């Protein structure tokens, strides 16, 4: 794999490299990257992996190769404390609790001595503290070069270091925010890269969809109102001019949310277009927002902060105009409701053209790697989504001895997954498996409803039970590992990026094949477009996507050469439908059984 990565970098071509768990793919791309003498951007799926790569893997590679390179770690701006907003929050003094007052003091003391400003260093302030949004910046509220703290700014320092580095470690969110020149507001921070290496590349299609989308949300407008009020505190007379338009947009926003209340939580914008009342409330909001923009325009020259507020408001006017233009071709217009707010979005129907343009513009090598990119050894589905016309592909099997280390169990007698009592029947089927494995299991679900039902049924298990949603994800994982015989019930976020090596995880149970929910308006529109073009969306899109998702879930089981375990796939369609063979062919080659006795023997 390292040789293939080195060749791709030399020739500046595209490489798709699928490397099974335990291959050592991180070292396979880091070694040629540090030895190349070229500017390389490495992007990972999560900030946790980013920290691991920079603080653990990269130092080992540098030590072994002796390569003298300048490396830099760069995260999105929300990960760095904003000194200006920290001061503003301290001066404002309005904090909701004594606890937050204490947290603010911790942050102020830490910010004075920190060299990075990365909030991952802070131990005394929880991740979900309401204080974080007040002491970090967004592209909308950042004052940029006009900020009085610009020269001390942690974000600016991190970006300067990245611009001077030979190897920059980023995450996919930041990479796409920068490549799409969106959200981050500093222009291009990854210029002149010779190669982009994207780990966990199976996440790219979904993430690219987010970054090429245009979204207008109630939260963006509420934050604009709050920040404008705060800014008025230092400009005499400004609040008298702006109070009424701020109140009018706030009121219009609440009326829109009420008008949308009778609609499903997520859907196509056509549902709103057919609702004359909701549409007229949105037009009222549009008018109120334009009036706020005009009022801000009249005050913009009075302070740097008000200039920034005016520009933000102009941006929101443009976004709202674009998402309300439901007739735009090649875009999917959709909405999503939350308990208090809403978001309206427009997403490109086909991501291949913008991604292709982006790669051509970069003139760099692109290396995309993950343990799950192929479907039965073929890469067409992944390549088509990203507009990769003629990539070099490489598939490297895991070095693990799957026939000896693992067993796949397909239980008999389960009803069709659409049956009303399906989850209850699955739980009944799984109880003897959990008895044989003595707990030590991940039970993964395709829906939260099924997860909740299983949690009710498994309340009396003789093993510690950990249920997603009852505690933060990292806490559940730590407690699960420490228990030694726990059973963890998880949905989407536990299907990937979770690593529990050793005996604590000896069984992975999956309730259904992970076909994407049909209630996603973007997916619906893409499938309809494929159908209109004479294709078969189920075969061309839904099956390949579900295969890749199943490979991710099944991949939680064997994480090390010494691991042993049983994979339980409950969905009867694996044996009753022709496409079931494709799913099984895409998984590591383990013995397959339909008998519970074989599971008992394996654990025995």
Image (tube, helix red, strand yellow):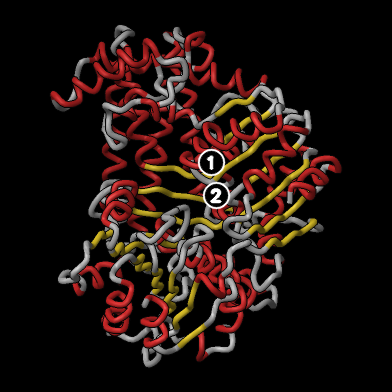
The answer to which of marks 1 and 2 sits earlier in the sequence is 1
Q: How far apart are marks 1 and 2 (CA)?
A: 7 Å
SS state under label 2 = helix
Mark 1 vs 2: CB contact within 8 A: yes
SS state under label 1 = helix
Image quadrant where one finds the C terminus: bottom left
Q: In this view, does 37 lie to the left or right of 296?
A: right
Q: Residue at x 33, y 56 (%)?
A: 277
Please give the label number shown on residue 173: 1
For the residue pair 510 and 218, the one nearer the viewer reads as 510
Q: How many marks?
A: 2
Q: Which residue is drawn at 70% across and 65% down?
A: 379
Q: Residue at x 49, y 63 (%)?
A: 558
Answer with the quarter of the image where residue 398 lies.
bottom right
Q: Can residue 449 be seen in this view?
A: no
Q: In this view, does 568 lie to the left or right of 341?
A: right
For the residue pair 418 and 402, the one nearer the viewer reads as 402
Answer with the quarter of the image where residue 422 lies.
bottom left
* Residue 20 in the image, given as x and y percentages of width and height: 61, 60
For the residue pair 59 and 121, the one nearer the viewer reads as 59
* Tag 2 residue: 207
């Amino acid at each position: 794999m390292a040789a293939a990565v080195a060749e791709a970098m030399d020739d500046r071509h595209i490489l798709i490299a699928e490397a099974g768990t335990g291959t050592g793919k991180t070292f396979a791309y880091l070694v040629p990257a540090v030895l190349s003498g070229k500017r390389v951007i490495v992007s990972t799926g999560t900030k946790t992996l980013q920290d691991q790569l920079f603080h653990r893997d990269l130092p080992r590679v540098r030590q072994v190769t002796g390569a003298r390179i300048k490396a830099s770690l760069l995260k999105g701006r929300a990960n760095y404390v904003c000194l200006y907003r920290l001061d503003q929050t301290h001066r404002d003094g309005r904090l909701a609790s004594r606890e937050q007052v204490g947290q603010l003091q911790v942050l102020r003391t830490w910010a004075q001595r920190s060299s990075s400003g990365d909030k991952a260093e802070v131990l005394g302030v929880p991740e979900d503290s309401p204080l974080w949004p007040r002491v970090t910046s967004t592209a909308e509220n950042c004052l940029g070069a006009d900020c009085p703290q610009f020269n001390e700014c942690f974000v600016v320092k991190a970006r300067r270091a990245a611009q001077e580095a030979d190897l920059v470690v980023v995450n996919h969110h930041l990479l796409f925010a920068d490549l799409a020149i969106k959200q981050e507001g500093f222009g291009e921070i990854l210029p002149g890269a010779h190669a982009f290496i994207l780990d966990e590349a199976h996440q790219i299609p979904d993430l690219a969809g987010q970054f090429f989308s245009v979204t207008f949300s109630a939260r963006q407008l509420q934050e604009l109102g709050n920040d404008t009020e705060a800014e008025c505190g230092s400009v005499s007379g400004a609040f008298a001019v702006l109070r009424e338009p701020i109140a009018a947009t706030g009121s219009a926003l609440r009326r829109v949310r009420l008008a949308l209340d009778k609609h499903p939580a997520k859907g196509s914008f056509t549902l709103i277009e057919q609702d004359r009342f909701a549409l007229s409330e949105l037009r009222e909001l549009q008018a109120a927002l334009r009036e706020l923009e005009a009022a801000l325009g009249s005050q913009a020259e009075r302070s740097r902060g008000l200039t920034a507020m005016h520009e933000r408001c102009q941006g929101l006017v443009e976004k709202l105009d674009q998402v309300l233009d439901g007739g735009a071709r090649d875009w999917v217009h959709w909405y999503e409701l939350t308990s208090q707010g809403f978001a309206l979005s427009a997403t490109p129907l086909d991501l291949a053209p913008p991604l292709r343009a982006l790669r051509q513009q970069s003139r760099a090598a692109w290396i995309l790697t993950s343990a799950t990119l192929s479907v039965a050894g073929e890469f067409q589905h992944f390549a088509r989504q990203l507009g990769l016309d003629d990539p070099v592909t490489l598939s490297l099997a895991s070095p693990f001895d799957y026939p000896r280390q693992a067993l796949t169990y397909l239980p008999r007698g389960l009803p069709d997954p659409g049956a009303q009592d399906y989850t209850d029947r699955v739980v009944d089927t799984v109880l003897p498996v959990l008895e044989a494995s003595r707990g030590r299991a991940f039970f993964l679900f395709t829906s939260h409803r099924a997860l909740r039902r299983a949690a009710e049924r498994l309340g009396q298990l003789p093993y510690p039970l950990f249920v997603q949603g009852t505690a933060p994800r990292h806490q559940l994982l730590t407690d699960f590992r420490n228990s030694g015989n726990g059973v963890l019930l998880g949905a989407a976020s536990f299907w990937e990026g979770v690593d529990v090596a050793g005996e604590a995880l000896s069984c992975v149970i999956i309730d259904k094949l992970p076909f994407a929910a049909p209630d996603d308006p973007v997916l619906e529109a893409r499938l309809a477009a494929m159908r209109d073009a004479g294709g078969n969306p189920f075969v061309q899109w839904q099956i390949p996507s579900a295969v890749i998702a199943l490979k991710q879930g099944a991949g939680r089981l064997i994480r090390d050469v010494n691991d042993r375990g049983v994979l339980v796939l409950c969905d009867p369609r694996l044996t009753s439908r022709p496409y079931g063979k494709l799913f099984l062919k895409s998984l590591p080659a383990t013995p397959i059984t339909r008998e519970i006795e074989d599971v008992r023997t394996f654990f025995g």
